[in-house]
Amino acid sequence: MQNDQPDLVSELPTLEGLLLWTMRAWVIGHCHGRNVGQAIHNVFTRLGAPEAAQALDDFMSTLGAGARRMLEVNCTCHPELTGDERSLLRALVFEQYEAPDDAYAMLATMVTEQAATAACSSAGRLVCSLVMAGHALRPTTFDEKRRFGNARRPVHGSARSHYLH
């Protein structure tokens, strides 16, 4: 682990690993013109949150359209995480634990301000869908663990690459 963050996909909790897989699959589909929508929808349906598939699509579309630079998202089979992938997962954690300013700041380093705002909205819908289905992302860095504690339930719970082939 680098800076108390996972380096490998295998080090991620299951839910985060599934989210990363869906993001990577989305990029493969987008870059190679493959229809991966059903596979992504199936993942979220199995989690009991089928509406999360549309939120993920909106999130990734917004990031792609507003990117300030090429975002590093690996292929689904790649074992290592990129810094951008870590940041995207952390932005989702921030949205889940109602720290939208932190999510916005994280995303605004990668995309335009307008895209960061829209991506935060999509991210909020995504994590809310998961929480309502009984799933919660876990804080992954030391600072996040200290800030959010080891909370099993997020605040929303009571409310609403270049390695592609």
Image (spheres, helix red, strand yellow):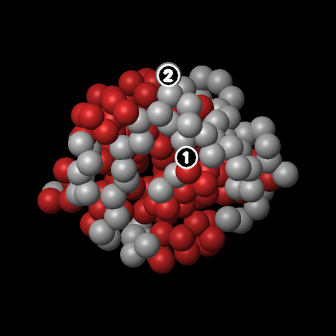
Q: Position of residue 93 (x, y in %)?
A: 37, 44
Q: Pick out the residue farthest to the right.
A: 165
- Residue closer to the observer: 112 or 73: 73
Neighbours of disc 2 within 10 Å: few (<14), some (14-19), many (20+): some
Q: Where is residue 141 in the image (x, y as percent from the top left)?
A: 41, 36
Number of other residues with Cα within 10 Å of mark 1, as a class: few under 14, some 14 to 19, many 20 or more: many
* As drawn, 122 above or below 132: above
Instruction: Name the mark on residue 111.
Output: none
Label 2 is placed on what type of residue? Thr
Q: Hey, what amino acid is under mark 1? A: Met
Say left or right for 109 vs 145. Answer: right
87 to 163, vertically: above or below: above
Image quadrant assignment for residue 162: top right
Looking at the image, residue 7 lies above or below residue 159 = above
Q: Mark 1 points at which residue?
A: 60
Q: Name the residue under label 2.
A: 109
Q: In which quarter of the image is residue 84?
A: top right
Q: For the point 76% across and 61% down, which residue is it?
A: 34
Q: Which residue is drawn at 80% across and 47% down?
A: 164
Q: In this view, does 156 lie to the left or right of 40?
A: left
Q: Secondary structure under badge 2?
A: loop
Q: Which of marks 1 and 2 is nearer the N terminus?
A: 1
Q: Can residue 23 be seen in this view?
A: no
**Image x and y of residue 138, in percent:** 36, 50
User: Which residue sits at x=66%, y=57%?
Assistant: 25
Q: In which quarter of the image is the N terminus?
A: top right
**Which element type, helix, strand or loop, lies under badge 1?**
helix
Task: Check the image and name the residue furthest to the left.
Answer: 158
Coordinates of residue 74 in the picture (x, y in percent): 71, 44
Q: Residue at x 26, y 48 (%)?
A: 150
Q: Which of 138 and 3 is in front in this view?
A: 3
Q: Nearer the viewer, mark 1 or mark 2?
A: 2
